[in-house]
Amino acid sequence: MKEQINEERKQPLLTVSHLKKYFKISGKGMLHAVDDVSFEVYPGETLGLVGESGCGKSTVGNVLMQLLDKTDGNVNLNGKDMYKVPKKEICQQMQIIFQDPYSSLNPRQTIRTILSEAYIIQKICRKGPELDKRLLELCEAIGLAPELLDRYPHELDGGMRQVVGIGRALSLNPSFIVCDEPVSSLDVSVQAKIINMLMRLQRERGISYLFISHDLSVVRHISDRICVMYLGQVVEMADTDTIFANTLHPYSIALLSAVPRVSDTKVSRIVLKGDVPSPMNPKPGCRFAPRCWMARPECFEKDPEFQEVEPGHYVRCFYYEQSREEMKTAETTGITD
Amino acid sequence: MEKEKLLEIKNLKVKFTTERAVSYALNGVNLTIHKGESLGLVGESGAGKTTTALSVLQLISKNGQYTDGSILYNGKELMGSAEKEMLPIRGHKISMIFQNPLTSLNPVFTVGEQIGMVLRQHLGMNQKQALERAKELLETVGIAAYRVNDYPVQFSGGMRQRVGIAAGIACNPELLIADEPTTALDVTIQAQILELMKRLQKEYSTSLLMITHNLGIISELCEKVAVMYAGRIIEYGTVQEVFHHPMHPYTEGLLGALPSLDSDKSELTAIPGTIANASNLPDGCRFHPRCVSCREQCRKQQPAMVQINDDHYVECFAHEGGTV
């Protein structure tokens, strides 16, 4: 399932470098939603983007899809500056699946209209037998009964609607799909179905995914590589096995230990104090320092670099070498604010 | 060692009538909570978890109707109790923590007033005593006492939920019902709340009914677990037994559908079909249309709860006779 792409690294499909997105909030200043994010997505791989709410995961996805303008930085698609390629062309290569299958489908359109829209806008075919044929193929790919084509979204349940959302993203056969929390509003049994489907489609068509989610076990299951985000920055990036076996950033360690597990493996838990601070006008220094359980004076003054500590493993922390040692000795911290 | 029964729900049936349909939310729930025990109630949305909890407090909405069953609390029948009899129980003997800390607190009262309200109502404290006690309670849940005069909007989601917990434990209840207390929260905040609940459970030895769809939380916090499907408990037992030797195909399916942090599963086993529609329930075993090992009998007859061993019960024909 998780193919090793480490050997003979292919050309990246998507290169994001130093991407920034600030929002101006009147009277308050700048909200740093995405602050200097860099990563690459290779053909046929899934890059998981995890973090808590408000860390900027979805903003990254929306900026990539040009649903929001960037503040600074560069995005290259197939080696070309994405912002210089006509939008219509981008749409053929990049698509997005939204979180909420209830609000992302137009309630006044039938499933048929929703799924045909892309073909018609891109002038691939007109209404008629050609379009019908394509829709049937699409239905088969996503496992949607063709009878449902003439229904309206409200007649379908959440899982089926998300299937339609996936179908819409797939219709132009894109090479890259941003999956923005595609399963978090679904029940476990339905969630499994959607995840299996996304993985099957990837095997069949070689699509790359940017899989945005707050659910670590889902991300672990589906991703080849994982980025952990905190307050607009990527704090750690590595392939899935490495990030779970050799977690280095103190935030990633705390995040992983926070997940309640069904299995017997007892993990010593690091309980972070307080809440995620506001991304408004951030102070200099490491963003995580105020909640960090191993913060040192230096962390509050200087910004740590996003550095490669072993091949393919990037960490944004001054003291990553000590983190695993300290975790062993760290007591499960009491709950105080 | 037989523990004393605190709450016993027997054959509870609830239906809701709307203009368009009648939906059968609970179809014979049997559940027992012993003193000092923590029970997890798990199931997907629409399984009837919250309705069960609200029934215990006799709080289901106007269009709901209890059609059968009994709820015994310390041997006293709660079903059909007058509002006057329920008042001293609600929030005092049995209290509840709600899912959404944003909507369960009143925005126009300070948190101190809201916690104090419970104390004044049930313990007859005066305003000043209540405020003092509210400060102590806030400290217990990890909020600085000086914030007692702040309004809910001034708190973050995690802290609001702590206020909810403080109000819930204010009268030292015998049973605390927590309805998805962490679903609206982030993982690291969820971890804070879970650690807090673990600590409180140890200190106050309150019985806990934990409602969640997150199997991981149950595994951490509870001794016993009950799995719900279409308004019935389909499997019940100790967490160890149920999660490691699931007997009901639905429980197996749920566990198989869950991606794991610790092991690699090549493919998740999705449960075919969708959750049974409460206004159009299938005959026989409610799970049979989705069941991989469905037999003829399952289509016609409702299976009875079978005891597998001391710590494990399951409602499935495949295990009839109690053989493993």
Image (spheres, rainbow, N blue to C red):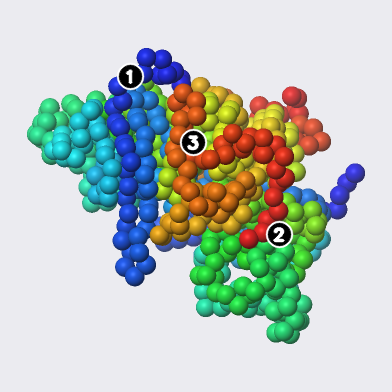
Q: Chain of mark 2?
A: B
Find residue A84 and report its image quarter. top left
Residue at position x 75%, y 25% in the image: B323
Please give the residue where the numbered disc 2 appears in the rendered image.
B176
Please give the residue where the numbered disc 1 appears in the rendered image.
A10
Residue at position x 53%, y 35% in the image: A217
Q: Nearer the observer, disc 1 or disc 3?
A: 3
Residue B154 appears in view: yes
Find residue B139 and report its image quarter. bottom right
The local secondary structure at tag 1 comes to: loop
* Type of amino acid under label 3: Val
| Count of numbered tags | 3
Residue A235 appears in view: no
Q: Nearer the observer, disc 2 or disc 3?
A: 3
Contact, CB < 8 Å: mark 2 with mark 1? no
The local secondary structure at tag 3 comes to: strand
The local secondary structure at tag 2 comes to: strand
Which one is nearer the viewer's eye here, B28 or B308?
A: B308
Residue at position x 70%, y 74% in the image: B134
Please give the residue where the numbered disc 3 appears in the rendered image.
A315
Q: Does B290 appear above or below B264? A: below
Q: Position of residue B54 (x, y in %)?
A: 62, 60
Q: Position of residue B129 (x, y in %)?
A: 75, 81
Q: Nearer the observer, disc 2 or disc 1?
A: 1
- Using residue A127 as the reference point, say whether residue B2 is left or right of it: right
- Using residue A307 as the reference point, say whether residue A249 is left or right of it: right
